[in-house]
Image (spheres, helix red, strand yellow):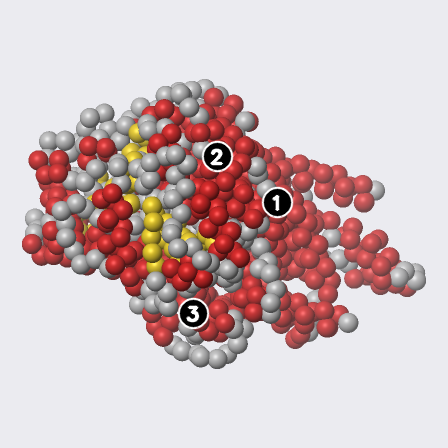
Amino acid sequence: MTLTREAPVATVREAPRKPRRHDGLTTALMAGPATVLYVVMLVIPVGLAFYLSLTDWDGFSADPAFVGAANYASLLDDPELRRAALVTLLVAAAGTAGLNLLGLGFALLVNGASRANTFFRIVLFYPHVLSALVVGFLWSAILGTTGAVNNLVTTWGGEVLPFLSDPAWATVTMIAVLVWAGFGVNVVLYLAGLQAVPHSLIEAAKIDGATRRQVFRNVTLPALGPSVTINIVLSLVTLLKTYDLVVSLTAGGPAGQTQTVAYLILWNSFHDARLGFGSAQSVILMLVTAALAFVVTRLRRRGEMAVHQ
Amino acid sequence: MRKTFLWATVAFMLIPLYVLTVNAFKGQQEILGNPFGLDGLTLEPLGRALTNPQFDVVKGYAVTLLFVVAVNVLSVLLAAPAAYTIARSPKRRFRVLMLFFLAGTFIPGQVLVIPVVYVLKTLGLMGTIRGFVLFETTLTLPFSIFLYAGYIATIPAVLDQAAAVDGAGRLRTFWQIVFPLMRPAVATMVILNTFSVWNDFVNPQIILGPGSGLYTVTTGVYAAVSQYSTDYTVVFPTLLLAIAPLLVFFVLMQRHIISGLTAGATKG
Amino acid sequence: MRSPRSSLVLSGIGCLLLLTGCGGGGFAGDSQAQQSEGRQVTVRMLVNISPNLTQAYWDGLVKPFEQANPGIDVKIEAPTGKGVADTLPQQLAAGNAPDVVETLMADETLAKQMLDLSDQPWAKDTPLVEQAKLGGRIYTVGVGVQAQSLVFYNKAAFGKAGIDKPPTTWDELDAAMGKLKAAGYLPLQTGGDFLTGLQLLQLSNPSRAQNHPTWQQDVSAGKIKAGESLLPYLERYHGWIGKGYVDKNALGMKYADAETAFLSGKSAMYVMGSWFTAAEAKAEKDFEVGVFPAPVDKGQQYPGPQGATLAAPYMILKSSPQKDAALKLVQWLVTDPAAVKSQLKQDGNFRTGVERAFTPLEKQVQEILDQAPAGVPQGEGYGDATLPKGFNSAWNTEVQGLYVGKSPKEVAEGVDRWLAGRS
């Protein structure tokens, strides 16, 4: 990933050795299989997605017609996609904020080696081990109209809380569940970042009479720069492709208001048999993901430079 | 103050797990009447979930485990030597190859799965275990190669040269000298890949399809639960069966898993 | 020294050979390999799984067929997606489509993939076969007829609310709902899932069919707009939400929840197809369930035309390597008396000339079917009265919009915009 500031390619050192006769063959044996598999199963499909996005194919007929950019044109005025794009961006933005604020916050709280802290880390982290599909079904059983919480509320004489039946609530619920399930990872990553903060700097600042807040803002946070970049990019890239949780938590509802782009891609491609149209959405999702990851990395890098100067 | 807050958070994190566990042992009336209570516990729903004709849990575990092992083995066999070639070569075209692999880390799986259907179909691998394993392996390659190449760069090249002087070929040098030193990096990748294969839903759903008769834990849970997502005597026991072994494994191995994941993300 | 590029190509070829070459060995799950062995053929059938139609039911249904035809093994496949509608295209795309598919009706897109059954003598006597013809050809054969436009009601609730005669017009329905609400009941049970749109289609069939007898054809031809022509019903439904005649949180309820809620006596009316009778027969409850045909506009004929769809429609895929066995199976499924009866009973459906032991409620539904002046296609429709694929779910999504603040007009426009994008 382009997340580190030093890509390993840059650290490759020339290893002087005698050229051997079977060198080419050996190289092919070592790098070939991976490259071929990568090309066949990843590069060709990406090209194919682009090609399919220029057709009106239903996915199985013998006669796909080439329609040029028509699918891309209809992307623009497809209200379903517009809504899904908005939901996806909202989930990505709010989710990234939530994951990172909670991640960094709790990392600071459970920093340091102790038995209790180990326990806390395990508890914060465990939902990540569960598949998003299971997490969604679990939370829908808890927050659904007939779920655990609403049963409690109604037996106490309250009104049903529309966690999953009102569009705004459902979107917030979905983001909250994503954050619940994922912030443990960010905690762990920020903890790793905190280990890298030079202890001497913190001590020096303390000796100079800095308050805890000042130490955090002026020493810890700048040193955490690379961690922040990694965390934000990872969160964004993960959240932009939210699919499993939509399937199990809301099934895209109510009124289709929680469909994400990834959900719509598969729905359009198969249920509506508009594979060409779905592929156009795929291409856009791919480009947006790459672009956002790139931009965030660049912005953060510039930010770090500014801090270090 | 800090402690109270942390314990409150712990409660919030664990309540869903508690609800899941107690309700897996209750009837629909007890679940609806008192979702947090402990009355009327019975093993009957769990027994029914175990014998659900829609989803054979034990077989689901076996199938998923087979995938995890196959993908991990294949991924190491392919990625490690490729990373070695890249890391030890001064040539420009290998740097390009590295970037070429790196680009793959930004492609969302959902985008790939539709066109991959046609590639696998052409190769006659659609709906087969082999096709699925090869595709899942491919998804692990970009990051594995990146991580391995980074790690190999930290292993002194002097070691290779010594082996070469002793007359070992590059293949033997790699597998016998360098690969054993890559253990930490390989362990990290195995942990990362295990979780991503285990929890994958969309790829097995589409590539295996109903024709193969193969269910992983996730697609099996979907088949068993999605139609009946409010018949809680199906939902809770099925979910419990799907996660319990994994959670036990996680708690036992947590130190390795967490540090492995950390290493994976921060080195990456 | 060979250049790395050419050696990459070389190893690439080797790798591909390895992929495709190690074909048969090692792994299970190659269904093709099993099929070619011996005389035994496997017919794969993709079916709808629902609370009525479980995997166990399907397995049991085809058992007698397998016993009578020892050379044929029927493999029931459950959808891996949301349902048959998205799993079949997925399988078609993957090139491993089943031999037989249940639940879907042929439309322009699917018909090209399906076997033409027009020259099968037995196909001509199956229910609704004329209506389901596409371009004069038979692709789909079914077991029976589902009556769609039925309103089931809680007789105790109607008694308590002082309603002695079921409503026959929309206005009477509104008045009845008012009384039911006053009597402390939720007047109409609705739900989320696919239920929201389905119920409104079911409810509107009889009056819509009198205003627009060839609605689907007219919509396809661009003579009328789908959403616009259904606007009066959308407005009425919207009114019910405002007046609390339906639960404003209904979207949080799954199909099964809605059914359970009605059967537990919490709500007074439930609009559903005839298959609900199967669930009613199984449920324990302390009140009697009645049924009346969906209401019509004032001045229209009552009962109006009944929404009628094909129960358990079967199609055979053209690509099937086991056409003979598949034909045999489908013929058996739609003509064998025991198989037909079993399917009708299991999913609460009807077929003229097939006598089976009816529950009192089923008897009433049969009477409604007999009295209906005509059977009309619903929503997406079938045969030559077919709207673009996916209409029903698009309609459903839009109708759900009424619950989340959209106006009836916006919903109607949304439906029309969807259709405009597909033609």
Q: What residue would you read off at disc 1?
A: A92
Q: Do labels 2 and 1 share a chain?
A: no
> Badge 3 sits on which subunit?
B
What secondary structure is found at the residue carrying circle 1? helix
> Badge 2 sits on which subunit?
C
Q: Which residue is drawn at 42% across and 20% down?
A: A67
Q: Which residue is drawn at 44% across and 71% down?
A: B29
* Along the viewing direction, whichever of A147 and A191 lies nearer the viewer: A147
Q: What residue type is labelled 2?
A: Pro
What secondary structure is found at the residue carrying circle 3? helix
Q: What residue type is labelled 1?
A: Ala
**Left-right relation of C96 to C118:** right
Q: Are marks 1 and 3 on the same chain?
A: no
Q: Mark 2 and mark 3: span between their CA atoms? A: 40 Å
Q: Are marks 2 and 3 in contact (CB under 8 Å)?
A: no
Q: What residue would you read off at disc 2?
A: C232
Q: Do the residues labelled 1 and 3 touch (CB within 8 Å)?
A: no
Quadrant that contains the N terminus of chain B:
bottom right
Q: Which amino acid does label 3 sit on?
A: Gln
**Left-right relation of B12 to A64:** right
Task: Indicate the position of residue A86 as horizontal and vertical percent values.
Answer: 60, 38
